[in-house]
Image (cartoon, rainbow, N blue to C red):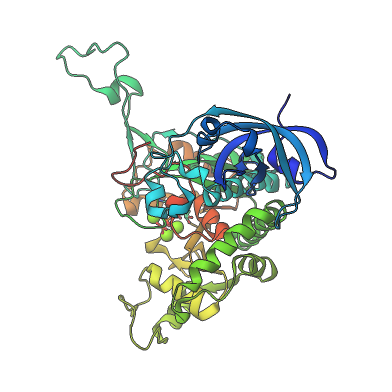
Amino acid sequence: MRHTKVKDLLNSTTTLQEVNAKGWVRTFRNNQFIALNDGSTINNIQCVVDFENTPDEMLKRITTGAAVSVTGTLVESKGAGQKFEIQVAKLEILGDSDAEKFPIQPKNKPSLDFLRENAHLRVRTNIFGAIMRVRSVLSYAVHSYFQEKGFVYVNTPIITGSDAEGAGEMFKVTALPFDGTPRKEDGKVDYKEDFFGKETNLTVSGQLEGETFAMALGQVYTFGPTFRAENSNTSRHLAEFWMIEPEVAFNDLDDNMDLAEEFIQYVIKYTLEKCPEDLKFLETRLLEEEKAKPQAERSELALLDKLNFVLENNFKRVSYTEAIDILRNCTPNKKKKFNYIINEWGADLQSEHERYLVEKHFKCPVILFDYPANIKAFYMRLNEDGKTVRAMDILFPGIGEIVGGSQREERLDVLVEKMKALGIDEEELWWYLDTRRFGSAVHSGFGLGFERLVLFVTGMTNIRDVIPFPRTPMNAEF
Ligand code: ATP
Ligand code: MG
Ligand code: MG
Ligand code: MG
């Protein structure tokens, strides 16, 4: 008999004579009630075992983590909390789980730190099941938005030949010799020369390649793995993450802000509609965590309210210059000043400043724009003031920067001059400059870190908890 997903059994409209469910035991209560989960929903289905007619040997094997198959009748449940349960007629243990050794015991309430060390098993907990389902729906929402709008999905290369961002946070790519035989006369293997004939690295952004496609296809987006050798251990940075990068021809910075705002609201709305139970579960869990904190540190809004707030309110658009004025004149906290006080126009904002603006001053998502040219990348459009560029960062409460974007410099001479000033090799980026040589036009785009979006939507606080197998310094166990 073919098994039915737990989700479908729980949503059934009638009782049914014979059903089969397969999944993993979460708990086994009173030698009678199995809470069975198969990953299709946050909810377990209760399976009532006829323990008087089940041999002790069998009952002993119903342990947390074991894979089982239950066949029986789907009946209305008398217990609170669930509509249906299965009266088990036939129980099979498909895979035993050693109760002593299985590390994810619900009664021990494993900590997130502990679970991180067991990334291959943590997905068997309610919380990680919920996060991973929400992540999956969010990624579908990303494609859904862009496809509905007629954007073309472009897979920009993972292995790239240029150090375009100039951030120096790259992983070099080296190839092993095909047969292990050194191919150089002196016996030394120069892998980089051997394979691509030049130095290559893992992509830190698909933007430059994306721009070349936007200048032919009009509206494009990438959504792919991105690599940065971040040498700091923060709760917002991974060495391997997923980035969403739309790029649109004939769009200026204002259009770019509109696009980012509409996009973020769309994917959040989509996920609220598709994942009500998982989000409710995450909200309840968060509320419990908040209760443990002192009053002053508690978040003002519950998760669903926070998500709805983003849907119902425009993001506040503020220029860098206005933001600096606010920061110069503010008293962030009676007890503690900023660690780093901004005195001069031109300084880069630190995350404490960004958080102040979003969480204390404006109390809503903020789009900061028109940054000083010297703290932003070379390809951003210089404003007529000659000092600022048409850049934007979107800052979210509890997260900080979630989006970085800009209108791109479309004027060849200005771009080349900027590259010269920064020591960026024109020869190296000849192909990029071609977009300015042949039919250049105003265009803009942004990069949104997918995991930061998942952080916001799930209410989690550490980026390592919203990606299946996190990559951070000294951590690539799995
Ligand atoms: P940050 O200031 O947080 O280091 P950034 O300004 O270096 O970010 P961008 O180059 O603007 O990042 O990249 C675009 C987006 O990609 C960021 O706004 C962020 O959402 C995401 N992002 C950047 N670096 C990481 C990372 N190491 N891990 C996860 N997401 C990242
Ligand atoms: Mg960075
Ligand atoms: Mg930044
Ligand atoms: Mg940025």
Q: Quadrant of residue 258?
A: bottom right
* Residue 462 in the image, given as x and y percentages of width and height: 43, 57
> Going by the image, does 245 lie left or right of 158?
right
Is 2 drawn above or below residue 393 in the view shown? Answer: above
Q: Is residue 393 above or below residue 57?
A: below
- Quadrant position of the N terminus in the picture: top right
Residue at position x 33%, y 53% from top? Answer: 422
Is residue 119 in view from this perspective? yes
Position of residue 387 relative to residue 4, above or below, is below
Q: Position of residue 266 (x, y in %)?
A: 69, 56
Which residue is painted at 65% across and 44% down in the image?
Answer: 140
User: Position of 162 compared to 269: left or right?
Assistant: left
Q: Which residue corresponds to the image point at 45% horizontal and 67% vertical from the top-left?
A: 371
- Front residue of 385/116: it is 116
- Of the four image quadrants, the one with ligand 3 is bottom left
- The percent position of residue 197, horizontal first and vertical second, equals 33, 24
Residue 382: tell me if it is visible: no
| Residue beneath the point at 41% across and 63% down | 373
